[in-house]
Amino acid sequence: MADYILHCMAESGHSYKVALMLQLCGADWKPRWVDFFNGETRTDEFRTTYNELGEVPVLETGGQMMTQSGVILDFLAEKLGRFGWENETERREILRWTLFDNHKISSQLGVLRFLRTFAKTGETDTTKWLETRCRSALAILNKHLARNAFAIGDKPTIADFSLCGYMFYEGELGIDLNEYGNVAAWLERIKSLPGWDHPNNLMPRQATPGAS
Amino acid sequence: MADYILHCMAESGHSYKVALMLQLCGADWKPRWVDFFNGETRTDEFRTTYNELGEVPVLETGGQMMTQSGVILDFLAEKLGRFGWENETERREILRWTLFDNHKISSQLGVLRFLRTFAKTGETDTTKWLETRCRSALAILNKHLARNAFAIGDKPTIADFSLCGYMFYEGELGIDLNEYGNVAAWLERIKSLPGWDHPNNLMPRQATPGAS
């Protein structure tokens, strides 16, 4: 049995944050596909066995089930000794960008992409409103990345893996990230990290196999 | 000058999380009113001087500007020695609920309440959709609080102050929290903490003075 089992699916950017960390650290891990689109995360069994919050990712390790990507990344940074902090100031800077990601970036990009690509609602007042909110958040990140190679400065950390969670699903967001030049350049820097791979190559995907 | 200046306004539930912590700890603090509704947080000056993320709260202390309520609460728990963790397991449990709050509770309740109470959009597809998402998150919290007096167990922590950020603005959310019995009982437990006070009493409010 692998050291880490990641309960996930390729469509989940929140899961990708963890899959990418495990991959870049060369950890001994395997994905376990969760049938999100047929409601697995909403079942009592999933919520009792895996996650009361009804979400992926879930990281199973040492007989424990860990949830919330930000917590799992914090745990893995300590456990695997990479992409974490060297002092309390760095720890809080990582936390600051991880919270901004959960509040304004991955949360909103993830939902916008869900409505457009999976729920296929078409363009509605809600998608327009969400796109405006996503663009405000992307503009803030873009400005920050004009002065910083990565979220907290010169080196990649788990905060970057959190922020980029939904950004490699090209064509599914309905926002061209190339409009945000510093974000696009930062994504290229992440892609250049040794071992980087696309969510669809790291985790199983049901809906449209092989699509990116 | 007070030890802590909280740049905030009473309408901000994210600011309230920090104001409540400072108040319950009996810290030496003062609020500085931010003119959010006339765009202060969107100015270049605010973003350069206070917060590149263009948000409140900002905690000014020791010549530093700290941002993101979850980071500030983490800092204050350590600095003031209350409502924090005793070990790494507790630290990660606090982080788990703080992230869930940022992702699904305060973020969504805050935006729903903004649309209904301040933007006064009336009931739209967006408010209906957001209400459904808020209710899903509240149901998860309600179930968790059936077995736990507070977010991480028997004692109040900064995770509770994060989660309750938008829940004392009675009548402004358009959701009656009494429908979630365990949430309502938990809010009463928070109100019973020595020194508790309402956001409108802790921070200046412009829009509708004295309203709750």
Image: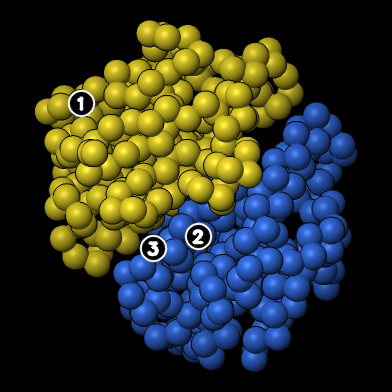
Chain colours: A blue, B yellow
Give SS at disc 3: helix
Q: Which residue is mark 3?
A: A92
x 17%, y 39%: residue: B27
Check the picture and name the quadrant holding the C terminus of chain B: top left
* Mark 2 vs 1: CB contact within 8 A: no
Q: Of the residues tagged 3 and 2, which is closer to the observer?
A: 3
Question: In the drawing, does residue A40 fall left or right of residue B195?
Answer: right
x 12%, y 28%: residue: B194
Question: In the drawing, does residue A195 fall left or right of residue A46?
Answer: right
The percent coordinates of residue A38 (x first, y second) are 67, 51
* Mark 3 vs 2: CB contact within 8 A: no
The percent coordinates of residue A148 (x first, y second) are 61, 71
Which chain's residue wears label 3? Answer: A
Q: Of the residues tagged 3 and 1, which is closer to the observer?
A: 3
Q: Which residue is mark 1?
A: B196
x 70%, y 53%: residue: A138
Check the picture and name the quadrant holding the N terminus of chain B: top left
User: Mark 3 belongs to which amino acid?
Assistant: Arg
Res B143 → quadrant: top left
Number of residues whose C-alpha sits closer than 10 Å to that of mark 1, classed few (under 14), some (14–19) or many (20 or more): some
Which chain's residue wears label 1? Answer: B
For the residues labelled 3 and 2, the Cα–Cα distance comes to 10 Å
x 63%, y 44%: residue: B44
Evaluate whether label 3 is on the same chain as label 2: yes
Which comes sooner in the sequence, label 3 or label 2?
A: 3
